[in-house]
Amino acid sequence: MNSGIDMKYVQERYEKMSNNELIYLVTQNAGGLTAEALDIAKNEIRKRGLNPRFSKALDVQNKTYTIEEIDSYCNLINNLNCPICDSVSEKLNATLTAEVMSFIIITQYKKKIHVGCPDCLDELNNSALNKTIALGWWGFPWGIIRSIQAITLNIKSKRSNHMDSPNQFLRSFILSNIGQLEVHKGDRTNLRHVIAKVLE
């Protein structure tokens, strides 16, 4: 079956990519690639002599997962040091923060998932909440509307920071970064880099 994509063009494009560009594609941006494009990327990985785990990263981004499978990836992260405070005393989880800053007719609304220990996640939610309360209301009409949304979201997100099991935000983080997690599965240092990048 023809997907309508010129596979020769795809092959030429992958060949012209630097190693870093190809690694980015296969670890973070391969979801939804056609079977033909996946095969071309795998051949390019082999041809360059890159780690075979990069081929696995392609596969994991194009698969449907059960909760149990997602939770097995969560377990890779749960026992790492907190990327914020470096503590190992509690299992890591994730939270969603929302911040609003407004000035008359301009309103900026940012949502972001963070991974960390429960206490650090609480601090991140509180910080976003305080920033929104202080700076979010000053835009009309969106400042007021978005501030209410952000305050509600931060309060709701904070409720799941201390769960013993992975929460919905950690599972969402896992699905968004599953290619990188697969490549670095046995390497705690690089797994820490993956979760620390979220804080940037």
Image (spheres, helix red, strand yellow):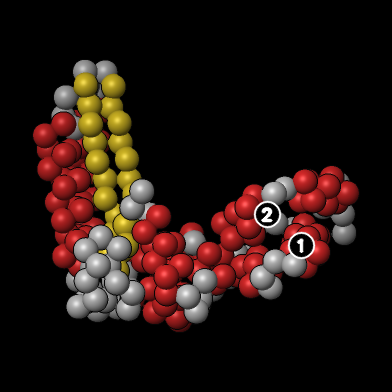
Q: Earlier in the sequence, mark 2 or mark 1?
A: 2
Amino acid residing under circle 2: Asn
Q: Residue drawn at (18%, 32%), measured in percent from left and top?
A: 136
Q: Quadrant of the N terminus?
A: bottom right
Q: Position of residue 28 (x, y in %)?
A: 56, 56
Mark 1 residue crowding within 10 angstroms, few (<14) / some (14–19) / many (20+): few
* Image-based side of 196 in relation to 67, left or right: left
Residue at mark 2: 19
In the image, residue 38 above or below residue 152 = below
- Return the mark for residue 91: none
Mark 2 residue crowding within 10 angstroms, few (<14) / some (14–19) / many (20+): some
Residue at mark 1: 48
Specify the quadrant of the image occupied by residue 107: top left
Q: Are marks 2 and 1 in contact (CB under 8 Å)?
A: yes
Q: Please state which of residues 191 and 9 is positioned toward the viewer in this rendering.
A: 191
Specify the quadrant of the image occupied by residue 39: bottom right
Q: Please state which of residues 160 and 53 is positioned toward the viewer in this rendering.
A: 53
Q: Residue drawn at (77%, 46%), measured in percent from left and top?
A: 16
Amino acid residing under circle 1: Arg
* Image-based side of 180 in relation to 4, left or right: left
Q: Please state which of residues 111 and 41 is positioned toward the viewer in this rendering.
A: 41
In the image, residue 100 above or below residue 104 = below
